[in-house]
Image: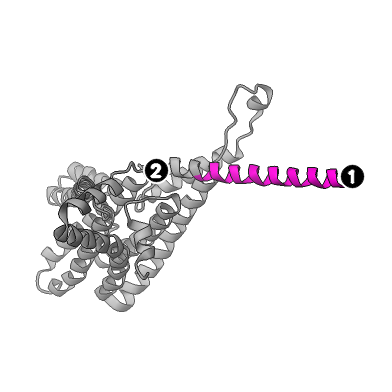
Amino acid sequence: MFFSYSRRLTGKVRTYSANAELACFLSFVAGAINAGGFLAVHQYTSHMSGIVSEMADMVALGDFSLVLWALGALMAFMAGSATTEIIINYTRHRYLQSEYALPIFVEAGALVFFGLLDGIHWHFEWLWTSLTVATLCYIMGLQNAIITDISQYALRSTHITGTVTDIGMELGKAFYWNRASRKDPSIQPVKSNKKKFKLLVQVLILFFIGGIVGAYGFKTFGFMFTCAIASILVYLALGPMIEDLKSLWAIFNDPPVVLEKTIEENNTDIPTLAEMAEAEELAEVEAQELETDELASAQEESSATLHK
């Protein structure tokens, strides 16, 4: 019962609401880590566009030591994204429930490692700075890839520039005047996706709140605050991981029957975020139509009774 929520959020079976809630959770965590990283190394580690621009500046100025430092941060971010995809595809091909939970668990471990780096701060400052930036970039890349994969490239948890762009696009659709479609019915009217807009705003707000909490937490408690963030991620990951451990234990005791059942249960296509939203909207329309039919039927019966 305790892990039922975590199983719903990070399990193999995906729903629109689970994807939306997980995106909000991870956006909050990303904001907290990003703010904490800035206090630690005075660098926002989720901004790859800024890091690439910095590399270009340093090449122009001839400061190649900083070019290598920025290149290391970029490679660490890509390594994090690659790690997520390797884990997801490995677990998916083995019909495991924890294809999204395992990368989150790895992220929690990387966060704890980031917290432990504080121990070498005063002894190896040059090494500490490089390791800290690389670790934070790795975490950001790993986490961003999780939501990107789950949402089929519709959402990012650390790329707020993209989120703000999408919010602006939805606002543009909402304020667009559909004169042409009114004159010509064959022209499809421009419509804003209200569900998507609401989710994007939530992701943006929770990233901001996470930044406030992260800045306050790191300023007050230091690197130990990473344990609090890591504990949230561990909880999110444990539900599906426990299910996989139970399945592996059952397979060990009764291999053929349980393995066949596990493959049959898990070998399902994962719908996209748009497909999930469309299915939910269709269900709402069908429910409204059913309610209208029932109301009309009741009115007809009432009218027939009055005539009698």
Tell me which residue sits at (20%, 45%) in the image.
93
Residue 142: x %, y % from top left? 25, 53
Tell me which residue sits at (28%, 68%) in the image.
230
Query: Disc 1 designates what residue?
Result: 308
Q: Which residues are magenta?
A: 280-308
Identify the colour scheme used: one colour
> Image check: 82 left or right of 22?
left
Measured in 3D between alpha carbons, the distance from the residue under mark 2 to the one under mark 1, in whole angstroms, is: 59 Å
- Asked whether 35 or 122 is in front, the reply is 35
Query: Which is more N-terminal, label 1 or label 2?
Result: 2
Residue 234: x %, y % from top left? 28, 66
- Confirm whether the magenta stretch covers residue 301: yes
- As drawn, the label of residue 40 is none
Residue 240 lies in what quarter of the image? Answer: bottom left
How many other residues sit within 10 Å of disc 1, few (<14), some (14-19) or many (≥20)? few
Residue 26 lies in what quarter of the image? Answer: bottom left
Residue 209: x %, y % from top left? 43, 64
Query: Disc 2 designates what residue?
Result: 154
Tell me which residue sits at (33%, 59%) in the image.
30
> Image check: 297 left or right of 249?
right
* Residue 47 visible in the shown view: no
Q: Choose mark 2 or mark 1, whichever is in front.
A: 1
How many other residues sit within 10 Å of disc 2, few (<14), some (14-19) or many (≥20)? some
- Asked whether 157 or 120 is in front, the reply is 157
As drawn, 8 above or below 286? below
Residue kind at label 2, given as amino acid type: Ala
Image quadrant occupied by the N terminus: bottom left
- Secondary structure under tag 1 reads loop
